[in-house]
Image: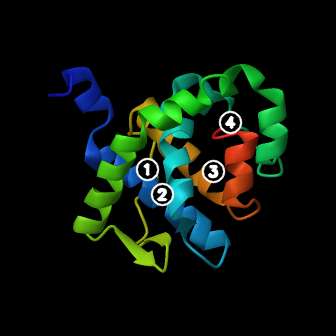
Amino acid sequence: MPRPPEAMALFNTALTSELLVNACWAKAKEGDTGLAWPAAYLILPLTLHPATRSSLPRDRRITLARWAGRNHDLLAGMEYRVANMALPTKRAIRHGLRTKRLGLEGTNLIALEKPKSPTPKWPDELRGSVKAARFCGRWFNVIDTHMAFELLGIGG
């Protein structure tokens, strides 16, 4: 079944792959490992959903647990969004691996080179999504993936 043009534009594999590259790069930059494979399935729902993206904290000291506790309304649809974004996430991972923007270290995804930093010339939504992906990547340095799924109300 062909995807609608709106979904194709929003879930463009090059864009979604670059969001994963940014999350992996930010995680590795401040940690010592890449992004756990299952955690990759949380990046797109956290960064592409406008209300969720805009609610992400700007302060790095705010943990995922604290953010989740303050955003119950957004978490109500998170399990659905994660399930809905599974196929675009798989496509993004495959695209990143195929184009050598992403690599594997064991079961962790890694960015193979530093992604471009957002500039004021970028559209606001793109710039915000990239910043959100980097922020979320950093979150995974301080929380186990299974705990992140639990806090977000996924699979429980």
Q: CA distance from mark 4 to mark 1?
A: 15 Å
Amino acid found under the numbered disc labelled 2: Asn
* Furthest residue toward front: 156
Circle 2 residues within 10 Å: few <14, some 14–19, many ≥20 = many
For the residues marked 1 and 3, what is the alpha-carbon distance in whole angstroms? Answer: 11 Å
Residue 91 visible here: yes
Left or right: 67 in relation to 17? right
Q: Position of residue 45 (x, y in %)?
A: 52, 37
Q: Indicate the position of residue 84 as horizontal and vertical percent values.
A: 43, 32
Q: Amino acid type of disc 1? A: Leu
Badge 3 amino acid: Phe
Q: Which residue is mark 3?
A: 135
In this view, 62 is above or below 4: below
Could you tell me which residue is drawn at 39 percent across and 47 percent down? 89
- The alpha-carbon separation of the residues under discs 3 and 4 comes to 8 Å
Do we see residue 99 in this rendering?
no
Disc 2 + disc 1, Cβ < 8 Å: yes
Considering only order in the chain, which callout, 4 or 2, is on the residue closer to the N terminus? Answer: 2
Give amino acid for label 4.
Leu
Label number found at residue 56: 4
Q: Secondary structure at mark 1?
A: helix
Q: Is residue 150 above or below residue 55?
A: below
Residue under pointer 2: 22
**Residue appearing at x 27%, y 46% in the figure:** 13
State which tag comes first along the sequence, 4 or 1: 1
